[in-house]
Image (cartoon, grey):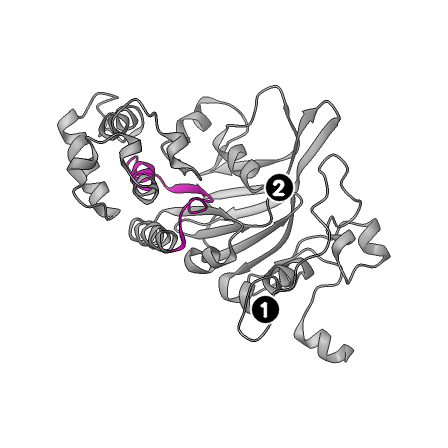
Amino acid sequence: MMSSLLDIQALSLGFRTEKGLAKVLDRIDLSVKPGEIVGLVGESGCGKSTLARAILGTLPEGQTEINSGYIRLDGVDMLSGGKAAEHLRGRVVTFVPQDPFASFNPLFRIGTQIHDLMRFKAPRDGKGSFGRSRKADEASAIAMLDAVQLPQPKAILDKYPHQLSGGQRQRVMIAMALLPQPRMIIADEPTTALDVTVQAQILGVLRRLAVERGVSVLFTTHDLGAAWEICDRVVVMYAGQTAEIAPREQFFGDPRHPYTRMLLDSLPAPGRDPVGIPGGVPSPLKAPNGCRFNPRCPRATDVCHETRPALIAEPNGHAVACHHPWSAEAEAAHV
């Protein structure tokens, strides 16, 4: 069995607030294999971005409380704060943000910002931070900008961020994420701010380049259509808990968790009207006991209110955390 590049087990963390500890992640389990594209899906506020920030080491200092679990990337403890973890960030694991405009410095040209990235993060053939010339870095940058299908890539280097469209800026961000030759990219809802046509193009570029280079991707999104387009496997989060994990085809074709089924039913489809999920995501300051979805779940019973369900893995790669998981066989027998 292929070992995981990213391994997260039983991770629980929260943020200290004036009203108490907000328990944002509750014993999260997640893994990503080398070259695999994993989608992390769920409603806003479910903890997707917090999990990404925990891997990247950008959680607020002095406010974050880690209660259990670990994050290991390429065998390195990413919660230790040590030099090994710091070395991986920006090199072995890189980041594509939701809003590229906010991530660029508006005062410097694209070429300057790419050069600064490569000066400190790009591989150096054993010669140290200054082992490559600026001309060699520029050639690498132009080649990567061409790979993300930006026309006239050399001219892009001379532009300021505001002179590019949203789709162009996101393509530059993907190029910058790939230039350090990482083993993993974390893409945090990278197409949210783009129109539908550009979204499809960006997803296509990201998947093609990740597959060609054997790069793993952790792709956070609330857009199930985007998850279908790009992901090999999907992890469903709800209110800081792992609800379901499944290969893409099984996730869309045979969902087991009631929350997953209701998410898919909320999507428009030919011949039926979308059905919303009643209620809202509970506050991390006062989460319900047992399964956190129980206040909104039509299948909930007493055990769902009292005991948190374990994440049970099946031989086919499907795993679900539910006391009453849905299945076609069970429903047929019930009828």
Give the Cα separation between the discs numbered 1 and 2.
25 Å
User: Residue at position x 46%, y 47% from top?
Assistant: 219
How packed mark 1 is, by other alpha carbons closer than 10 Å (few <14, some 14-19, many 20 or more), is some
How packed mark 2 is, by other alpha carbons closer than 10 Å (few <14, some 14-19, many 20 or more), is some
Residue type, mark 1 in image: Asp
Q: Secondary structure at mark 1?
A: loop
On screen, residue 230 versus residue 308, left or right, reads left
User: Residue at position x 68%, y 76% from top?
Assistant: 329
Where is residue 293 drawn, in percent x and y?
A: 73, 52
User: What residue occupies the far left of the structure in this picture?
Assistant: 135
- In the picture of the structure, the residue carrying the numbered disc 2 is 45
The answer to whether residue 166 is above or below residue 129 is below
On screen, residue 48 versus residue 258, left or right, reads left
| Magenta segment includes 2 | no
Q: Nearer the viewer, residue 67 or 100?
A: 100
The answer to whether residue 13 is above or below residue 249 is above
Q: Nearer the viewer, residue 260 or 213?
A: 260
Q: Nearer the viewer, residue 156 or 85?
A: 156
Where is residue 13 drawn, in percent x and y?
A: 65, 33
Of the image marks 1 and 2, the number of the one nearer the N terminus = 2
Where is residue 171 drawn, in percent x and y?
A: 31, 43
Residue type, mark 2 in image: Gly
| Magenta segment includes 190 | yes
Q: Secondary structure at mark 2?
A: loop
Number of on-image labels: 2
User: Residue at position x 66%, y 59% from top?
Assistant: 276
On screen, residue 255 versus residue 303, left or right, reads left
Residue numbers of the magenta segment? 172-196
Q: Which numbered dot is residue 254?
A: 1
On screen, residue 180 versus residue 334, left or right, reads left
Quarter of the picture containing the C terminus is bottom right
User: What residue occupies the far right of the structure in this picture?
Assistant: 302
